Image (cartoon, rainbow, N blue to C red):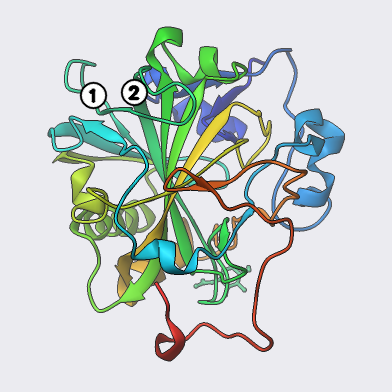
Amino acid sequence: MKVVLCLMAVLGAVAAQEYSPHPKLKVQEKDSGDAPSWGYGGEGNPVNWYKDYLQCGGKRQSPVNLPYVGELLKAPNRGRPLVFHYYNALNPARLVQSSKNFDFVFTGSDEYAPVVSGVGFNPSDKYQFAGLHLHWGSVDSNGAEHTLDGHTFPGEMHFVHFNKKYGSVENAINQPDGLVVIGFFLEISSQSMPGLTKMAKGLHQMRATYQTELDLGDMSLLEFIKGYIYNWKYYYYQGSLTTPPCSESVQWHVFPVPVPISRADLEVLRQFPTVKENFSDNNRPIQNLNGRKITYDGLVVSRDKPWLPENFKHSPSNEVY
Ligand SMILES: *[C@@H]1O[C@H](CO)[C@@H](O)[C@H](O)[C@H]1NC(C)=O
């Protein structure tokens, strides 16, 4: 049986039959036979991923802890901004369930597909949007993949892009300049970004009707991050996919300012996909930096150990970001 990886998640056989993702999102496993199962608990937990997926034991894995940057947060921008094209374009959107998560993809033509440039080490290359997914916890104190100065968030949103010169995620996945992921933390707030609310409504409907796919109508990516990208500074480092096969082909760009999600929408995520099973706590633990450089606004800020005051707890009263 030919096994298809949906971005990062291995599909179960049932899902694979029903599954027809955007072709750009498909990632082909190199050999035949069932891909080994992996997950976040039990035998297939992240510590064991490397046994079946060698790259998961590599030296430039993700996520990592992003260090404290103090005054730099408020300083005027000095680094290069990311350039977003067609993030405001409306495209037909679809939610597609995978084995440990779901993907938000666009199903239309490439003409108005969102593209980002100005990235990492090859700012003139163009990276096309392939899919968006979230990681989230069953409780507020878990969920994000990266940590910010040792501090965790209840969720994280990943916009996955492939270098246009490779044509698809599948072809880009093993290239050093193959992928760009743009990450945003999620923080509980009274209101969600409108895109997250539409996503949650869709997931709720999928759960209620036992569907593994749902069309959401026309949407733009800006609905998820409007007001959170322009002029904001970001962390940058070279890492990997955070799920098997953990390919070390990702230029990470993580924004320090969290995007709001309502408790109601987060609860929908926590109950997805069924009453019997949910995908909460689908976040990989922090990986060693192994001497890698992390920059913030173009300045090197990496440190191997997180800086964290004793007994630091995240609460609105000591919120620094
Ligand atoms: C999610 O699944 C876990 C493990 O089965 C369970 O303990 C938890 O109650 C579930 N959460 C929700 C919101 O259904």
Across and down, in percent, residue 91 comes to 17, 31
Left or right? Give the position of 162 relative to 6: left
Q: Is residue 304 left or right of residue 210?
A: right
Q: Residue at x 23, y 36 (%)?
A: 93
Element at badge 1? Answer: loop
Residue located 25% across and 52% down the image = 225
> What residue is disc 1 on?
113
Q: Is residue 131 above or below residue 256?
A: above
Q: Which mark is on residue 172?
A: none
Tell me the quadrant of the picture where the N terminus can be found: top right
- Give the Cα separation between the discs numbered 1 and 2: 7 Å
Viewer-proximal residue, 185 or 312?
312
Give the percent coordinates (x, y) of residue 49.
79, 41
Single out the residue that lies furthest toward the right: 51
Residue under label 2, please give it.
128
- The answer, for residue 271, to whether it is visible in the render is no
Q: Provide residue 28's location: percent of width, then percent of height.
A: 59, 17
Displayed quadrant of residue 293: top right
Of residue 13 and residue 64, the one placed in the foreground of this image is 64
Q: Depth check: 199 or 213 in front? A: 199
The three-letter amino acid code for the residue at tag 1 is Ala
Q: Are marks 1 and 2 in contact (CB under 8 Å)?
A: yes
Quarter that holds the C terminus: bottom left
Quadrant of residue 58 within the rendered picture: top right
Label 2 Cα neighbours within 10 Å, binned few <14 / some 14-19 / many ≥20: many
Label 1 crowd bin: few (<14), some (14–19), many (20+), radius 10 Å:
many
State the residue at coordinates (19%, 50%): 223
**Is residue 106 in view?**
yes
Q: In the image, is 206 to the left or to the right of 14?
A: left
Classify the position of ligand 1 by quadrant: top left, top right, bottom left or bottom right: bottom right
- What residue is shown at x 36% (from left), y 51% (from top)? 233
Q: Amino acid at mark 2?
A: Gln
